[in-house]
Amino acid sequence: MMDAQNGLAERLKKAIKDADITQGDIASRIGTSQPAISQWLTGKKEPSPENLADIARHLRVRTEWLISGIPPMKVADPEADRAAHFSGAGWGFRQAPDDGGRDYGNANVWSFDPGLDVLVREVLQNTKDAALSADKKVEVTFRIITLTGMDLNEFQEAMKWKVLRPHLDDSKDGKQKFNTLLRDGLDQFDKKEELLLLVIEDTGTTGLTGPEHGEGNFTALCRNNLDSNKEGTGGAGGAFGLGKAVLWRASRVSTVVFCSHLSKPEPESGKTRYRVFGKCELAWHKTLDKDYAGPGWFGRTDDQGSAHSYWENQTLAEALYLGREGVGTTTCVIGFHDASADTERKPIELAQDLAKAAAENFFPALVADKLGVRVEVYDSGQQYKERKPAFSQTVNPEAYVPASVRMLRAYWEDTAVEQFGETKDEVAVREVTLIVPKRIDHQKHVEQEHKAVLLVTAADEEGPSAGSEKANQLAMFRGPGMVVQVKSLAGLCLGARPFHALLLCGRAPELVAPRMSRATPQADLAAETFLRTAEPPSHNQWTATPDLKSVYARGCKTRLEAFLKAAADGVRELVKPAPKETGDGPNSLKELFRIGSEPATRNEQSSVIEQRGEVDGEGRWRVSARVRLKARKTWQVLTPAVYFLAESGTGTPVSWESLRAEKGCEVKGLSLLVPPDTREIRFAGLTDPKSHPIPAEDSCAIVDIRKVTEGKESAL
């Protein structure tokens, strides 16, 4: 009882402090004495239920919170909250430095491609990094809301648009790239009198924890640059602190606001709910005869004009479309647009692209049920308040990357095979070794051997309607479940059927199939860290970054390159056609080689026994072949043919652009002249791109001898 009473005393102290009144004030309001209040605050006595109800009413806190500590603390009072934020909320802009230096924008904003794909990658990666725990699912909802008329006026009033707009206007003037984009954004807004919001709500995350200044999730996102604070335990994806810049890049007015419910109290105030704060990334500008460095912040302003977090004002959060339940953060990108598009795009089109990007980049995390994503579109503020979306979709990766989903399920169900057979949709699995170099910084470890998992399957007969899953590509990812690199392996080997491939690295096998025990968890963790260090700020490849070379022993670049080559070699071994030493060429081609209605004339004693090739920079297959044939006493004329094997597995003939003799033959036009008594020839050729039914990089090619005739004159 004493512990509960002491908890009540502490909560009563907090409520009186937040209300900014004295013990005597509350005593007079509830009709008791100041000494009685003092005894309640020290825990010597406990107020009666009637006293508790009176205290809660006058301090505007919930009785349940006073008694048990169950949040929320405050009783919602929209009118009082509205009056408070209208008088207390505002914008504070950083004054220009005394030395007169000028900063014409935050360079971080230009560090990434501006497309929606990058926006989704960075947002979901940062959200997953803030997961409450590695085994807890993170849910993210993207909402696109169109504001016009009264909805727009109310939103502008809540965010103090009249204070912000002069800074925007004065910052748009100039010849820098940022000035041009801001000017265009404001012109669009003034012309249409319409504002598009992108509201991103996450749950299952830590929230914007930490103090108002210093270190923590809050300052890393809202105040500091190049701050990659990772407080969650979801397995970090980013390491540079640059990714958050995509939010401001996606805003026409370079302004983003946040609202967060924290997983642990803010250390200075002890508060956890409705932490509202905003940031506007501007260039140097002059407003009202004052010079400003650029950035400004939205929140509760003090006497010096600085903005701080605005706490526990539910009405303000909801007026900014930031209302939420549960621990996590809601982000609002003001003036949302696709910065990579050169035309205006409809909200539903934007939403569909967001869903597609989430599926393509995070299908491992989605399949592993560690991430859930939903997109919604609202045509008005009223429609949003009624939660009646004009468009709504839960992201299902199978609708976009069905072959990748099939491979992951086969691995999870332990049905993958070592080598392809005849069964449709079969998934083959191989191990690919990564030798993790010795680490030489403060987190030292010896060289370790990691076994990554390679999964390969034949390309579907019919691709997904979205057309997003291309054949002949290798997608690679690690523990967080975001695809880091997609590498084209088109032209890997001649005669291979189109395929899809995945490489599960570091702790990715554990993510996809947690029930399957791994023999070397320490090596998996070492590989996870090594590959994370090998990622540049865009996290879209594994390469020899400066950090990699500084924390790992010499040879780390060679180890990485050998690993990536081994992965490609593993795919080649699985998809290359089985060699045939039969006289009629590869068995798979028996039924393919028909040109029009004329049957092919075949020499039973000739066969293509070796073929190699690659796609060149001009989109042509550059091939070479070795042909074995029965020696004859007369000249022979061979007509070589080349076929594209597309995703259906069938062959389509394409034309030669040129042929070149290499051994034992001569070239006449597009035929090969073979002298008498010749048993083997070699030739090379280039395909004609004009005859390609599909791009060369999306196909596999195979060479065969279509026709053999006797007599040198037949080629003349």
Image: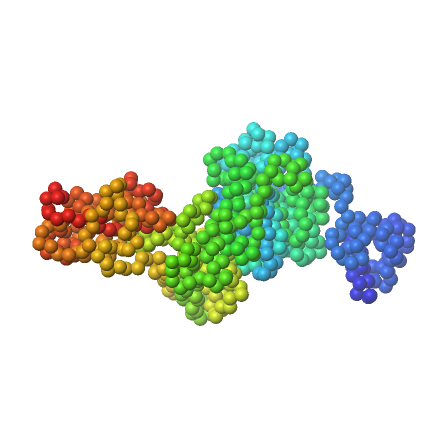
Q: Quadrant of residue 561?
A: bottom left
Residue depicted at x 49% and y 58%: 409
Furthest residue to the left? 633
Q: Is residue 346 left or right of residue 448?
A: right
Q: Nearer the viewer, residue 600 or 123?
A: 600
**At 86% across and 63% down in the image, what residue appears?**
44
Q: Position of residue 485 (x, y in %)?
A: 43, 53
In the image, taking residue 636 as reference, residue 535 lies left or right, namely right
Residue at horizontal 75 percent and vertical 52 percent from the top: 73
Residue at x-position 26% and y-position 45%: 594
Work out whether residue 304 can be spotted.
no
Q: Could you say which is closer to the camera, residue 48 or residue 465? A: 465
Quadrant of the drawing holding the N terminus: bottom right
Q: How many numbered circles are shown?
A: 0
Residue farthest toward the top in the current orientation of the protein:
191
Q: Quadrant of the C terminus?
A: top left
User: Compared to 129, does 151 lie above or below?
Assistant: above
* Residue 514 x, y percent position in the rendering: 53, 64
Does 197 appear above or below 541? above
The spot of residue 218 in percent (x, y) is 61, 52
109, 331: nearer the viewer: 331
Instruction: Decide if residue 419 is in sight here.
Output: yes
Picture colour scheme: rainbow
Tell which of 206 and 607 is nearer to you.
Answer: 607
